[in-house]
C-alpha cells in the first residue's frame, strides 16, 4: 500500500492497528520536523511513511519498525542536510 493509498482509504477499512501505526509515524514526522526545520513537512512525512513501508514489506517481526523507521529517516535527513537537499 502506498502512502497515498493509505491516506485515501477510510480508517474503517484499514487493518487493525493501522491507526496506531499511523499515529506513531505522525509523531515521528513532528519530531523530525523539529530537528530538521529546513525540510518541508510533506518531504519528511513522505520519507517517514515510505521508509516504514519499505521496512515493513520485508520484516518478519514488526515490533521494532517504528524505531528503525526513525533511525533510517534521521540518517537520510542528516545526509541530505550535509549534501544540501532532500532525496
Image: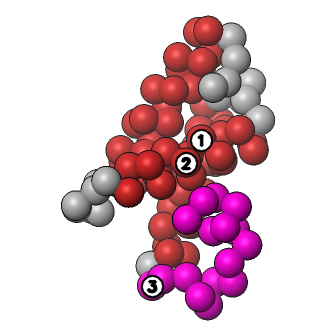
Q: Is residue 60 above or below residue 13?
A: above
Q: Decide if residue 27 is in sight here.
A: no
Mark 3 and mark 1 in contact? Answer it, CB < 8 Å.
no
Task: Give residue 16's mark.
Answer: 3
- Looking at the rendered structure, the secondary structure element under dot 3 is loop
Task: Give residue 50's mark.
Answer: 2
Residue in the image at 60% along x and 18% along y = 80
Residue 30 position within the rendered picture, expressed as x and y whole percent measured from the top left: 64, 48
Residue in the image at 74% along x and 24% along y = 38
Residue in the image at 59% along x and 41% along y = 47
Mark 2 and mark 3 in contact? Answer it, CB < 8 Å.
no
Label 2 vs 3, first from the N-terminus: 3
Q: Is residue 7 left or right of residue 65?
A: right
Q: Is residue 69 left or right of residue 9?
A: left
Position of the C terminus, as image quadrant, is top right
Q: Residues within 10 Å of mark 1 (few under 14, many from 20)?
A: many
Task: Give residue 47's mark.
Answer: 1
**Which of 34 and 47 lies nearest the eye of the viewer?**
47
Q: Residues within 10 Å of mark 3 (few under 14, many from 20)?
A: few
**Which of 37 and 65 lies nearest the eye of the viewer?**
65
In magenta segment, residue 66: no
Q: Is residue 52 left or right of residue 7?
A: left
- Looking at the rendered structure, the secondary structure element under dot 2 is helix
Task: Give residue 76's mark.
Answer: none
Q: Decide if residue 32 is in sight here.
A: yes
Residue 10 position within the rendered picture, expressed as x and y whole percent measured from the top left: 69, 84
Label 2 and label 3: CA atoms lie apart by 20 Å
Mark 2 and mark 1 in contact? Answer it, CB < 8 Å.
yes
Residue 27 position within the rendered picture, expressed as x and y whole percent measured from the top left: 57, 55
Q: Is residue 67 above or below residue 87?
A: below
Residue range of the region highlighted in magenta in the rendering = 1-16
Amino acid at each position: 500500500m502506498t502512502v497515498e493509498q493509505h491516506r485515501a482509504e477510510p480508517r474503517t477499512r484499514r487493518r487493525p492497528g493501522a491507526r496506531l501505526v499511523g499515529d506513531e509515524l505522525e509523531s515521528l514526522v513532528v519530531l523530525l520536523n523539529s530537528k530538521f526545520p529546513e525540510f518541508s513537512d510533506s518531504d519528511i512525512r513522505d520519507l517517514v511513511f515510505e521508509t516504514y513501508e519499505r521496512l515493513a514489506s520485508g520484516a518478519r517481526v514488526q515490533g521494532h519498525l517504528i524505531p528503525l523507521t526513525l533511525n533510517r529517516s534521521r540518517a537520510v535527513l542528516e545526509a541530505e542536510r550535509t549534501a544540501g537537499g532532500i532525496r
